[in-house]
Image (cartoon, helix red, strand yellow):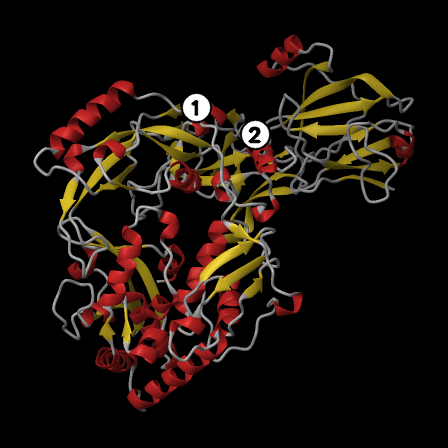
Amino acid sequence: MRLAHTFSRAVAALGIFTVVSFAIPAAAHADDSVDQLKKTNPSAYEWAEGVQEVKQGDRLIVPTQVSPKNFEIRKDIAPSGQGAQYTPPFSVYSDATLTVDLGFSVASYGSQGLAIAPNPITLMTRSQASPLADITGNSGWGLLPMYYLVQYNDLDTGKLLERPIVRRIRVSDEGFLPRPQNVEVDEEDNGTFTVSWDPVEGAESYYLVHLNSTDDKGVTRLNPKLMAETSATSWNSDQREEGERKFDTTLNAALRDFFTEEDFKGMEKSGGFTDEQLDAMLNGKGDQIAVIAKKGVKVSKMSDLLDIEGTMGNTPIKIASNAWRELNPNDSRFQSLSDIPTQIPMVMADGHTRVLPIIVDPERSWISTGNPRTIRDPQAKLHVSYHIGHSRFTNTFIVYNFDPSTYLNDLTKMKEEQEKTQTGYIAPDLTYSKQTTTKSTAPDDKIARTFPDTPMQVLGTTALSKYLAANMMNGAADIDISQFKDDAATITQIQEAFWEAKNQNGLVPWGYPSLSEDGKILHVEYGTEDAIEQHLSPKDYTSQINSAADKAVADIIKPGMDDAAKVRAINSWMIEHTTYNYAGLDKMQELWRDPDRKKHRYTHDLFPDHDAGGIFFKGTTVCEGYANTFQLLATKSGVTSVVVTGNVTYSDGSSIGHAWNQVKINGTWKTVDVTWNDGGDSRQEAIETRYLMIDNNSPLLTKQRTWKDPAIKKIL
């Protein structure tokens, strides 16, 4: 009979070793935290003296003649296993505060007693399927520096003990590299933190591991996550991969995948979490880190676990967009310098949102002149550069009304005042509105739940983006995404999948996405019925574009053409049949000039300029339509192409959002920008071949373009 003690997110606990009794010999390594616990709460537990050291492959047998079903049931835990009538007489924890329950199994072992067996947990990385290391279970006891075994029942009678007995178990380093010692964390003045440790003899590299995560009920589990691998003996939280560009608008890039309240706050029941559940997830056991030494396939045991909860609470990652929207609906645009705030909400590495002080930077601020045909605002505006506290995080505000002759002095005075009054990290009492999700009102039989047949190949980097693209090609307005647990775990993932589906598939109409309250249904508002004179349904809109694209390809692509010739033919055909829609751009700019961000919503007549409909139905478009149409024609012609979105910065410092294409020619990715070949929004005369299959390291590109598509860039 097996007594299984399994939690919703079971993690490994104990290895297997032989012990003939629970007489634990004293050892010299009793940790200080235990001594502190004995002082603060002396009556809660009986702490067995000393620390027992065991070998990795040993097996733990607990001598008892009591049958598992005869152990008195604890009141604080549900019976183990479906239909089970008993609970195990033990728990195992990874920490001296007995907070992080490792979860494990207990089995009867004949007349000798109970055998405590491990549940495996491994250190994984997203980029490979095989585990990096067995934290517990698979290889015996595992790599934890200490285990805390709590006995709740008397082993002779089965009755509950008044004071549960806690025993400490340490696994021998025999067969392992030496454990890293003297692990320290130092907070830096620039808003990052550095972890350092002593070198380990023979080690080639080190794993830096983050431990612990808390569920929506406030229960914390051991959940090892690889933060970094390095050959050095220190690591900074803002350290990037070799060759990865460092932007001043993001900090602590290695921590961006951590769960934060910004993933769900302000989203009514989004992802199934209430604000109370989110608070429980963010206020569990403090964050811990450990270091593992490595040489080939050989590893060390974990270093002592180091609590860094306070450090991560002082480590900013990015602007908290939901909180910023609530505190300042006008976003980053202000009428005058006096309207600029003195603080801004930031997402911190511990998951919480904090309000941090702003310091303006007069020397890096600048004025951009107006040009209604190429930039969002026709009037001149002041770009006020600022940074967050003492960090290197830098961003800009836009101010419309200012004195060009005095703005430098005005900003200098503002900076002096801000530096005088700069305070530390402030935890605000933020209230989020509930306006970002919608109820799904579609009848059940109208909700798309399968991958439908499509008129052409579907492109995407994730299963969710391909699934969305296929359904949007078929005009589905309500799409069930509940089966995509990994790809749709956060609002950000869903948004990225939606826009990738639209951008990389030229038959997908432009639309507004919104999410149902339960996070299971994605609704898309297309507006095709009002976008053009034909008043087409989304599916008919796509069908007519598909037919028109087939005809264009048949007219321009001839037998024997190589990919380069096909790209030239598509580029020429598009320029001949298209006019850049400056009037539409002006209308979009008018919407965006309104400081009330809630009014920035395109009308349906603007939709076709953002998909292939503009060219095929009206003969006009903007950059997004150029890129989408090129993508459609290239795919139908057998040319490998992707759409890239990003920003273009001009010599005067102003910038504009832009879209263009990458094509694969003879195995090499090249840039094609049909918009700028046609003269649209480039501030240059139209030259049909200027941006046609040019090298990606060309000065024409490297000095001004910034990509926004991390998933796309990884495949190039």
Quarter of the view holding residue 22 = top right
Using the rendered image of the protein, determine whether residue 487 is visible from the camera's viewpoint.
no
* Dot 2: element: loop
- Residue toward you, 688 or 626: 626
In the picture provided, is 649 more to the left or to the right than 543? left
Callout 2, which amino acid?
A: Asn
Is 451 located above or below residue 393 in the figure? Answer: below
What whole-number distance in Å separates the C-alpha atoms at marks 1 and 2? 23 Å
Is 586 located above or below residue 377 in the figure? Answer: below
The disc at residue 184 is 1
- Residue toward you, 339 or 486: 339
- Residue positioned 45% across, 67% down in the render: 526
Q: Which residue is mark 2?
A: 283
Callout 1, which amino acid?
A: Glu
In the picture provided, is 402 more to the left or to the right than 581? left
- Residue toward you, 338 or 539: 338
List x then y, in percent, for residue 495: 46, 55
